[in-house]
Image (cartoon, rainbow, N blue to C red):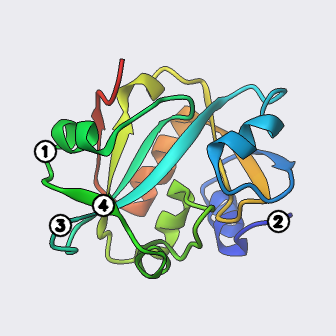
Amino acid sequence: MRGDSELYRILAELEIEFDYHEHPPVATVEEASRYWKDLDSAHCKNLFFRNHKGNRHYLVILEHSAILEIRDLEQSLKQGKLSFASPRRMKKYLGLEPGSVSPFGLIHDHDNHVHLFIDENLKDSGKISFHPNLNTASLIISYRDFLRFLEWTGNSYEYVKLYG
């Protein structure tokens, strides 16, 4: 299977079942959506931000078709001015390369530095999908197991209304 072998080990340890789907490399949600048409799950847009000082980092997870302006996001999150985190920061905190952002990258955030903001519209999802830390596959897990995974990571998270 393509993806992060450490992630697969942790999912097995947590007894989290998943459906695995390979696809060509996809760097954007628009590209990935071509391969999701037959997959029964909520698909997400995962955005990695830093605050103005660069001392706080945030992973924002929202429904893939949501259109979101950074200015609106700043007002919703009340974290000050935000900008996309650099590839160097992404590697440092999530162990990921651009185009592969996923909450599964939190397995590499041993200091629980990254805070998650999860779109409240995803709460009612039965299943949810993310890259396995590599953008050539997607894993579908139950939303309940996603929450168990987040509890395991120890990273802080909260629900926010991001749009609509």
Marks 2, 1: nearer the viewer: 1
Q: Which mark is residue 83?
A: 4
Which quadrant of the figure has residue 152?
bottom left
Left or right: 66, with 11 as reference point: left
Q: Amino acid at mark 4?
A: Ser
**Disc with the residue nearer the chain's start (1 vs 4):** 1
Marks 1, 3: nearer the viewer: 3
Which residue matches tag 1?
A: 78
Q: Which mark is residue 2?
A: 2
Q: Amino acid at mark 2?
A: Arg
Numbered label tally: 4
Q: Amino acid at mark 1?
A: Lys
- Report, in whole angstroms, how far the alpha carbon at label 1 lies from the one at label 4: 14 Å
x and y percent of residue 76 in the render? 20, 36
Q: Nearer the viewer, residue 4 or 89?
A: 89
Q: Nearer the viewer, residue 14 or 35?
A: 35
Q: Determine contact: label 4, label 3, CB under 8 Å.
A: yes
